[in-house]
Image (spheres, rainbow, N blue to C red):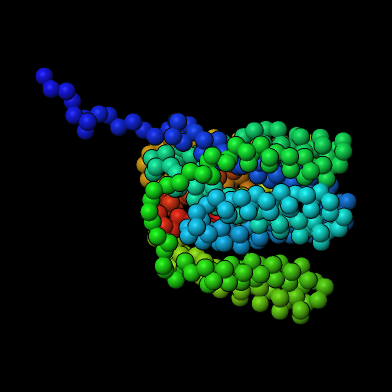
Amino acid sequence: MTAPKALDTPHERSRILGPEYRTATFGILLVVTLIAFEGMSVSVVMPAIADELDALDLYGISFSAFLIASLFANVVSGLWSDRRGYPLPFLAGVVLFVTGMALAGAAHSAMLFLAARAVQGLGAGSSVVALLVMIARVYPMEARPRAFAAVSAAWVVPAMVGPAVAGFVATQWGWRYVFYGIIPLVVPALVMLVPALRMRTSSGTEPSQGPRSRPLAMTLAATATAGGAGLLLYGVDRLHLRPVPGAVAVVAGAAFLVYGLYRLLPPGALRFLRGLPTTVLMRGLFSASFFGVNSFIPLVLQEVKSFDPTYAGIALTTGALGWSAGSYLQSRRDGEAHRRIRLGAVCVMVAILICLLSVLPGVTGWIAVPAWIVAGFGMGFGMTTVSVTALRQSPVNEQGRTRRRCR
């Protein structure tokens, strides 16, 4: 009786915590946890920051400054990761992120705080795109859904303790120490990430040579997009004070923004063409809907419903937990991706409509808690599917470019 051939040996599924990928997984999760702590903490203490710096009118812009800078960094980091590898853009992003945290803690004016938020955005945008490219390069296709689910799950601990810790620290010592307290976490994170950053893949791919992969052209497009978004926000803010200059700024900002998005997004994205164009645009719609409302939940609960900062953060906690649950479930399900994306979008939409009720007189603010569980579930179930689908639709040598678009 002959021994079974090697081809008859059952295929062993790759495990993200197996010996081959364990180091990379822990390194990625450490950094995501660090960034998650910042995101959860800033949202909770922003009302106190706006009061002390007399910048309530700049509340939304402080989040926009982070996102606009992050968008610019996404493009540069994606191009860099595709052409030179992910370690350097990741390390540069971490340095910028920590610098922004220090500047935010030391800010004594609204303008300096906005600048600090922009520096944080540059760092977070660069490091997160590099991490996602790392997932695409290090893990096999079958393990990527579980890797993305693990990245979402890394928000669980910060979501559970971040809002409460941030509220306690802000109440006892002031909001500045929320920023300062995160900085020391970088040292052990980087020490543990050194082996992961030394990992190399043997894909042997060459950078894409398409028109949307030229570094100078894409950097200019990212500059136009970021500058246009900033100019648009400035114009909207000035319309009631100086209507004519404000209107000019709005028109110019919109023009730059449309030009930049046209160059950055896949061809046909603005027309929702089937395939990668719609996949990339769906991630943008998911993010804009969820994070736009998420930023203002603590402000509404504290200023309108008189919640304590710690209690106001509970809604953010439940949202992140729902996200992790949704992400885990999508990683365990097979079937058509577009059905999961649709379900996620419906969950986010319904949750936002319910949250709108919390600003009405006579309606308890606690209604935002179950609503944001549903929203988080929709994000985890839908947007994580979008991430996996986008990588599946992209050539290996364009994964960094796809990740920056998806951001």
The residue closer to the viewer here, 223 or 21, is 21
Q: How many marks?
A: 0
- Which quarter shows the N terminus? top left
Q: Quadrant of residue 160?
A: top right
Residue sitting at x 13%, y 22%: 2
Residue 202 or residue 150, whichever sits in front: 202
> Measured from the top left, where is residue 391 in percent x and y?
43, 51
Which residue extends farthest left? 1
Drawn side of residue 392 relative to residue 134, left or right:
left
| Quadrant in the picture for residue 73 | bottom right
Residue at the spot x=75%, y=49% of the render?
101
The spot of residue 367 in percent (x, y) is 69, 39
Asked whether the viewer can see residue 342, the reply is no
Task: Give the answer, above or below, for where 244 lies relative to 47.
Answer: below
Residue drawn at (74%, 53%) of the image:
100
Task: Please state which of residues 92 and 74 is positioned toward the viewer in this rendering.
Answer: 92
Viewed as shown, does residue 81 lie left or right of 313?
A: left
Looking at the image, which is closer to me, 207 or 390?
Answer: 207
Name the quadrant containing residue 11: top left
Q: List x then y, in percent, for residue 78.
A: 52, 58
Question: Is residue 224 visible in this depiction of the protein?
Answer: yes
Q: Residue at x 56, y 55 (%)?
A: 407
Q: Position of residue 364 (x, y in %)?
A: 75, 39
